Image: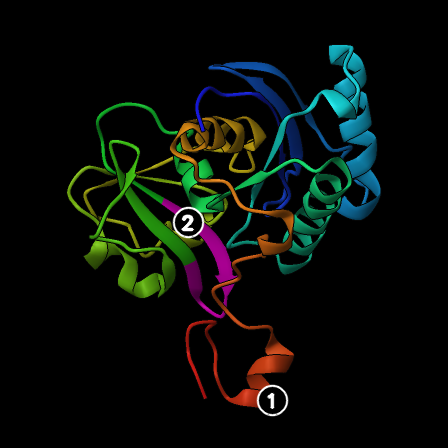
Amino acid sequence: MTGVPLLLAVETATAAPSVALWRGDALLGERAAEPGRATAEALLPALDALLAEAGLALAAVEGFAVSIGPGSFTGLRIGVATVKGLAFGTGRPAVAVSTLAAIAAHARGPRPVAAVLDARRGEVYAAGFAGGVAADWLPEGVIAISALAAQLPPGCRVVGEGVPLCAEALRGADAELAPPPYSETTARHVAALAARAWPRGETVAPADLAPRYLRRAEAEVKRTGLRFERERP
């Protein structure tokens, strides 16, 4: 699979849901979901408005991209379900993008980057990146905020909505905490990462799209006694 077609990207895992259109190596347009509205109510109007602004119909979209997590359980379900429905309806493939990778893409420059999101219970979803590539010093997962500093390389830049939660624990550490706003629009970065993956054939069929929660929902934890997705009874 070569070339990058017209992609429609959706990001709903964070506090600032957004959508973007991307073709080749360029952003064609981006739109944040209307503030104050539930993601389920705001997402489709944002998609419709984005396509209208670009003068395009949904039929023109040749592929989809979606952030699959980790992040808000509700937001992930809505975003993945929406893209799955659109991909099924149009017969187009999709690219699944790590939410933490999309957040890390905001940070520019040579520094190593750690992307963090609130995982509650004194923990964050976190992943490390170096040169835009996942780094083994902080594999994607759930980590106690108190343990984060020990995992970061010198001069690491910490980005994402989890930054305020980590500020105290990283006090005195050789790390740079990104300033607010933390809930930056990330659909453009989901699209950019998908555009890189597309020529490599890293697409999935609509039926195979699924959220990556990392942590199990509280009700499931109580039922199974297992906290994380990869654990087995």
Q: Name the residue carrying label 1.
A: 223
**For the residues bearing labels 1 and 2, Cβ distance under 8 angstroms:** no
204 or 146: which is nearer to us? 204
| Badge 1 element | helix
Image quarter where the C terminus lies is: bottom left
Across and down, in percent, residue 221 comes to 55, 82
Q: Which residues are magenta?
A: 115-124
| Badge 2 element | strand
Q: Amino acid at mark 1?
A: Arg
Residue extending farthest to the left is 154
Image quarter where the N terminus lies is: top left
Q: In the image, which disc is placed on residue 37? A: none
Q: Is residue 190 left or right of residue 156?
A: right
Magenta segment: does it hold 121?
A: yes
Mark 2 Cα within 10 Å, few/some/many (few <14, many 20+)?
many
Q: How is the image coloured?
A: rainbow
Q: Is residue 83 left or right of residue 204?
A: right
Across and down, in percent, residue 171 comes to 28, 50
186 or 150: which is nearer to us? 186
Residue extending farthest to the top is 55
126 versus 63 height, above or below:
below
**Which residue is at a point 46% across and 15% down the rendered structure image?**
25
Q: Quadrant of residue 43?
A: top right
Q: Name the residue carrying label 2.
A: 116
| Magenta segment main secondary structure | strand
190 versus 67 height, above or below:
above
Q: Earlier in the sequence, mark 1 or mark 2?
A: 2
Mark 1 Cα within 10 Å, few/some/many (few <14, many 20+)?
few
Q: Is residue 33 left or right of residue 100?
A: right
Mark pair 1, 2: CA separation: 28 Å
Total marks placed: 2
